[in-house]
Image (tube, rainbow, N blue to C red):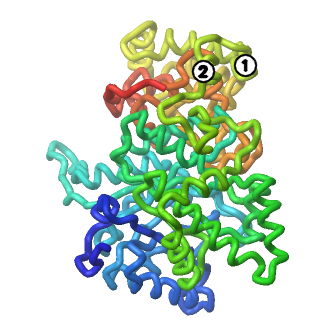
């Protein structure tokens, strides 16, 4: 057991191979610390803080889109008592300035462990629903954290060289949603996982799920893509009949619970303890599976008393060494039509290591009919190749024309008129001035994505539908288009896109040609020699 008095950092705890660390999620409440619920949570956090069996406490940030007490309020006494704390930081409520300010505050207060999240869409609250921010996403936030860790360079003005600020020491992680049902929603999540890691995520916590095969598949994907140096944390959520019903009805974005498992959970509600003993044992089995599969740590959520935490840990430690293999076959709740990237091993109920889904591989080479591959898409691809590749085709001419215009940021009025009309009709363009159409398979993230996601999908889709507006997720559609072209693996193989809001209302064509938009702010990403999937 690690000696917590030595104040080891989380990255060292997660690297301790002889120990299976345990973190517990703490959900804050609405109101001040004097509220009854806050006092209850504070008591639970105190128990976690002083327990040698708990290695860190993870504190949510307005979970579920609800306004709640800021995580730093609960985290400060835990941190000062010597326990590691992970602060969840989401992009739904703050723009990049506020996020940077919050990071400076956290660093100054001694909080160095960050879980970077895009965040849930806001729900009804004070005087209705809040306007979400989503200025940047989790990839953009990780990129910012990396720059802070290197020492952020700030323009000094005039001819003075930029000032380099003191480097921070954040240990940042991210989440991944690996329990998706469909090929076009699962694989984009894996591609975005890689982007999060390349942007600085040092540990990954997977989404809530109840299928050991999908949990195993995530680790196999990491090994196949040579990403297994990243610390993987298995997420175990303690169910109840009520929560199982919510999950089954997809009331919590991104969380999937099958009809079969829901029926079992509802059956437990009739037992004398309303299923509590069953649900704690179920969580202990999941924790054993995480350890057996090779996750570096376990993460307990949905638990609200330390007595329940101890019961789960005691049960998990009481199991025989290989019992997890039996549990893995038992806790494998998937749908008959569910897509898996790796072949099924009927002997274990898990994946066959290294063996990709043969039917999926057969579907890759040939172009197949797809409703998302429209004439508009095909024409847009050809037009983009002609006009919008730096230094190629008609791009140099476009730059010359715009440079000579009265207002270079708008270009000549006739060209601006053509751009505005064509993009409004074809893509419902919002005139952001920093266009990502060429990177999102010509599906506008401003008008067709509730969270304006430009670096891959959020985790909140429900069966391929947007969690907010219930239309097809643009990243599922983008994957279908890329697969049709035989380029599905290239969906996110580019530098992170961080939109420049200062260009709003100007010509995105002119901004591209004159090198003002995001496409010229970063170099092309390195091409690591990774096995193709």
Identity of the residue drawn at 53% across and 35% down:
352
Q: Return the residue found at the far left.
A: 160
Q: Is residue 179 left or right of residue 370?
A: left
Residue behind mark 2: 483
Residue behind mark 1: 370
| 130 up-or-down from 373: above or below | below
Residue 175 place in picture, x, y as percent: 50, 53
Residue 507 visible, this orientation: no
Residue 174 place in picture, x, y as percent: 45, 53
Q: Is residue 423 left or right of residue 324?
A: right
Q: CA distance from mark 2 to mark 1?
A: 10 Å
The mark total stands at 2
Q: Is residue 141 left or right of residue 263?
A: left
Residue 38 place in picture, x, y as percent: 57, 86
| 413 up-or-down from 186: above or below | above
Q: Identify which residue, 368 or 235, lies in the foreground.
A: 235
Q: Is residue 463 left or right of residue 121?
A: right
User: Looking at the figure, which quarter contains the N terminus?
Assistant: bottom left
| 73 up-or-down from 22: above or below | below
Identify the image quadrant of residue 466.
top right
Residue 85 place in picture, x, y as percent: 39, 72
Q: Return the residue found at the far top.
A: 393
Labels 2 & 1 near each other (Cβ < 8 A): yes
Identity of the residue drawn at 64% across and 22% down:
359
**What is the secondary structure assignment of the residue under circle 1?**
loop
The crowd level at tag 1 (other Cα within 10 Å; few <14, some 14-19, many 20+) is few
**What is the secondary structure assignment of the residue under circle 2?**
helix
Q: Identify which residue, 327 or 124, lies in the foreground.
A: 327
Q: Identify which residue, 368 or 20, lies in the foreground.
A: 20
Identity of the residue drawn at 72% across and 71% down:
240
């Amino acid at each position: 057991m690690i000696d917590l008095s030595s104040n080891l950092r989380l990255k060292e705890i997660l690297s301790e191979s002889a120990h299976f660390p345990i973190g517990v999620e703490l959900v804050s409440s609405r109101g001040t610390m004097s509220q009854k619920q806050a006092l209850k949570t504070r008591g639970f956090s105190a128990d976690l803080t002083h327990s040698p069996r708990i290695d860190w406490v993870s504190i949510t940030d307005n979970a579920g889109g609800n306004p709640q007490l800021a995580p730093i309020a609960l985290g400060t006494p835990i941190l000062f008592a010597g326990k590691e704390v992970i602060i969840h930081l989401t992009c739904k409520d703050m723009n990049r300035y506020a996020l940077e300010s919050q990071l400076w505050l956290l660093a100054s207060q001694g909080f160095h462990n960050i879980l970077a999240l895009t965040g849930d869409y806001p729900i009804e609250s004070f005087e209705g629903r809040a306007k979400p921010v989503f200025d940047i996403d989790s990839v953009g936030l990780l990129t910012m954290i990396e720059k802070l860790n290197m020492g952020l360079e700030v323009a000094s003005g005039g001819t003075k060289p930029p000032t380099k600020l003191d480097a921070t020491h954040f240990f940042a992680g991210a989440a991944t949603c690996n329990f998706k049902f469909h090929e076009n929603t699962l694989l984009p999540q894996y591609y975005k996982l890689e982007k999060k890691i390349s942007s600085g995520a040092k540990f990954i916590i997977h989404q809530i799920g109840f299928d050991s095969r999908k949990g195993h598949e995530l680790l196999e994907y990491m090994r196949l893509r040579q990403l297994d140096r990243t610390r993987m944390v298995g997420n175990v959520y303690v169910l109840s009949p009520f929560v199982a019903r919510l999950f089954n009805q997809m009331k919590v974005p991104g969380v999937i619970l099958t009809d079969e498992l829901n029926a079992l959970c509802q059956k437990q509600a009739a037992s004398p303890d309303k299923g509590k003993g069953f649900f704690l044992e179920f969580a202990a089995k999941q924790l054993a599976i995480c350890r057996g599969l090779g996750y570096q740590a376990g993460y307990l959520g949905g638990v609200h008393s330390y007595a329940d935490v101890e019961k789960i840990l005691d049960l998990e430690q009481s199991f025989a060494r290989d019992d997890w293999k039996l549990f893995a076959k038992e806790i494998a709740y998937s749908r008959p039509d569910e897509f898996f990237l790796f072949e099924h091993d009927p002997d274990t109920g898990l994946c066959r290591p290294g063996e990709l889904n043969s039917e999926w591989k057969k579907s890759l080479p040939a172009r197949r009919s797809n409703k998302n591959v429209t004439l508009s898409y095909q024409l847009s691809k050809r037009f983009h190749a002609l006009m919008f590749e730096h230094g190629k085709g008609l791009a140099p001419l476009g730059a010359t024309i715009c440079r000579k215009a009265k207002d270079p940021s708008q270009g000549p009025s006739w060209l601006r008129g053509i751009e505005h009309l064509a993009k409004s009709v074809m893509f419902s363009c919002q005139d952001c001035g920093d266009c990502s159409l060429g990177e999102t398979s010509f599906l506008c993230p401003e008008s067709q994505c509730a969270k304006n996601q430009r670096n891959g999908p959020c985790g909140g889709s429900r069966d391929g539908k947007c969690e907010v507006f219930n239309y097809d997720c643009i990243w599922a559609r983008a994957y279908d288009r890329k697969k049709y072209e035989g380029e599905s693996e290239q969906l996110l193989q580019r530098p992170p896109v961080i939109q420049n809001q200062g260009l709003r209302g100007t010509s995105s064509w002119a901004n591209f040609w004159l090198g003002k938009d995001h496409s010229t702010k970063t170099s092309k990403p390195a091409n690591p020699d990774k096995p193709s999937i």
